[in-house]
């Protein structure tokens, strides 16, 4: 599964990058995030536990995962490698590129799917990728973009 979510943000790179890297404050900015906890802190990121809601019609589905997070201030980029949860093995890249209208922010997820024989590909490509990963990434990107555009960084 490869899932790409992209948005043009009318804000400076420094503001959007700071919001993207400040994951511990996401629940205060993003109502679909239940919690974010740094389990291990490092100068360039650490191990982070995240939980979000995925609303599907009247249902509120809880999601949860643990990732190794790397903040690359030179690139700039924020990378994740999911190490626990159903999405274990997923790689995620937040990339930032200046464009005439402001800043293009791209979140890319790569994943082979859960370790379920025969259902691995269909589960990733037909259910988890589009219904959960894409939906949560879009809401996250939109919410942080609004915050950056308001100058909340």
Image (cartoon, rainbow, N blue to C red):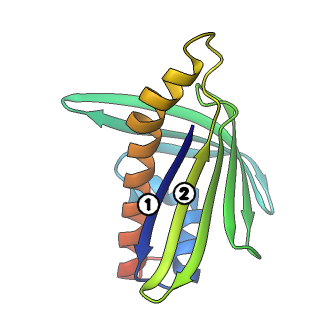
Compared with 124, 37 (above or below) is: below
Instruction: Say which of 41 and 137 sits in front.
Output: 137
- Residue, disc 2: 107
- Left or right for 70, reference 122: right
Which percent across, then down, holds residue 15?
53, 80
Q: Residue at x 66, y 17 (%)?
A: 115
- Residue, disc 1: 141
Q: Which badge, 1 or 2, comes first in the chain's sequence? A: 2
Q: Residue at x 69, y 73 (%)?
A: 76
Q: Residue furthest top?
A: 117
Looking at the image, do the residues carrying marks 1 and 2 touch, with CB atoms under 8 Å apart?
Answer: yes
Q: Label 2's element?
A: strand
Q: Label 1's element?
A: helix
Q: Residue at x 40, y 53 (%)?
A: 138
Compared with 71, 84 (above or below) is: above
Compared with 87, 78 (above or below) is: below
Q: Residue furthest right?
A: 43
């Amino acid at each position: 599964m490869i899932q790409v979510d992209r948005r043009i943000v009318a804000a400076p790179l420094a503001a959007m990058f700071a919001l993207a890297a400040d994951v511990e404050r996401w629940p205060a900015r993003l109502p679909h995030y239940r919690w974010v906890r740094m389990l291990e802190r490092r100068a360039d990121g650490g191990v982070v536990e995240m939980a979000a809601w995925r609303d599907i019609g009247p249902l509120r589905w809880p999601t949860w995962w643990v990732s190794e997070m790397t903040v690359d201030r030179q690139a700039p980029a924020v990378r994740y490698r999911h190490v626990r949860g159903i999405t274990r093995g997923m790689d995620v890249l937040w990339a930032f590129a200046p464009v005439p209208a402001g800043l293009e922010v791209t979140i890319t997820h790569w994943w082979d799917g859960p370790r379920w024989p025969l259902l691995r590909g269909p589960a990733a490509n037909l259910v988890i990728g589009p219904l959960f990963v894409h939906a949560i990434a879009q809401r996250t990107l939109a919410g942080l973009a609004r915050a950056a555009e308001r100058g909340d960084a």
